[in-house]
Image (cartoon, grey):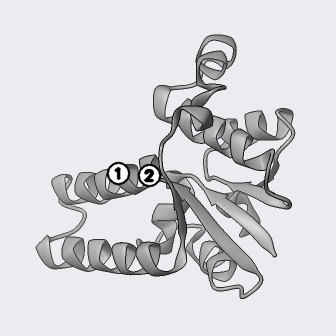
Amino acid sequence: MQNLFFDTSALVKRYYEEPGTEFVDSLVTDDDTKVVLTSIAVVETVSAFRRKYNREDIGDDVLDELLASFFDEALSDFLILPTEESLLVNSFELVLDDDLRTLDSLQLSAALSVSENVEELVFVSADKELVSLAENKGLQTQNPDEAEN
């Protein structure tokens, strides 16, 4: 079984149609995969949907549908990791040495920590710079935006 660690940039594509959505759907619905998220990604995903609403890209009904679909699937099918100190051990280094933003450093730090104990972990992100850094840190990666090109 392959474990897919999703950051928010890729996860949002599962629920909101944009480039890369078809690829993300194929990953998530593959019976031989398990989706892994941090509790940070849960909050970030809700925030991303709210920003779309605030920019008037979506209305009330669509926001409600996005949230319902996300929480239904996340709570029933995904492994959601609590944000524990052990997952954040690399965060400071990622900020100081690699100039990552706070949430990106927390996500990548968690993925690096999980990869130490989980076989076949793939970091899934639509952020090219974050994917490149994850690869430099030894993670297997998938970028949904590049997979469909």
For this view, does 149 lie left or right of residue 82? right
Q: Quadrant of the N terminus?
A: bottom right
Task: Give 33 or 59, whichever is nearer the viewer.
Answer: 33
The three-letter amino acid code for the residue at tag 1 is Val
Question: For mark 2, what is the residue?
Answer: 39
Question: For mark 1, what is the residue?
Answer: 43
Q: Which mark is residue 110?
A: none
- Residue plotted at (60% across, 38% down): 87
Residue 80 vertical placement versus 9 (above, below): below
Q: Position of residue 9 (x, y in %)?
A: 52, 53
Task: Give 131 or 32, whichever is nearer the viewer.
Answer: 32
For this view, does 56 lie left or right of residue 17? left
- Label 1 with label 2: CB-CB less than 8 Å: yes
Q: How crowded is mark 1: few (under 14 residues within 10 Å), some or many (20 or more)?
A: few
- Residue plotted at (75% across, 33% down): 133
Marks 1, 2: nearer the viewer: 2
Task: Give 50 or 3, whichever is nearer the viewer.
Answer: 3
- In the current view of this chain or complex, which residue is farthest to the left? 60
Indicate the quadrant where residue 79 lies: bottom right
Q: Is residue 142 visible?
A: no
Q: Is residue 7 visible?
A: yes
Task: Give 111 or 83, whichever is nearer the viewer.
Answer: 83
- Residue plotted at (38% across, 73% down): 70
- The CA span between labels 1 and 2 is 7 Å
- In the current view of this chain or complex, which residue is farthest to the top? 96
For this view, does 3 lie left or right of residue 102? right
The three-letter amino acid code for the residue at tag 2 is Ser
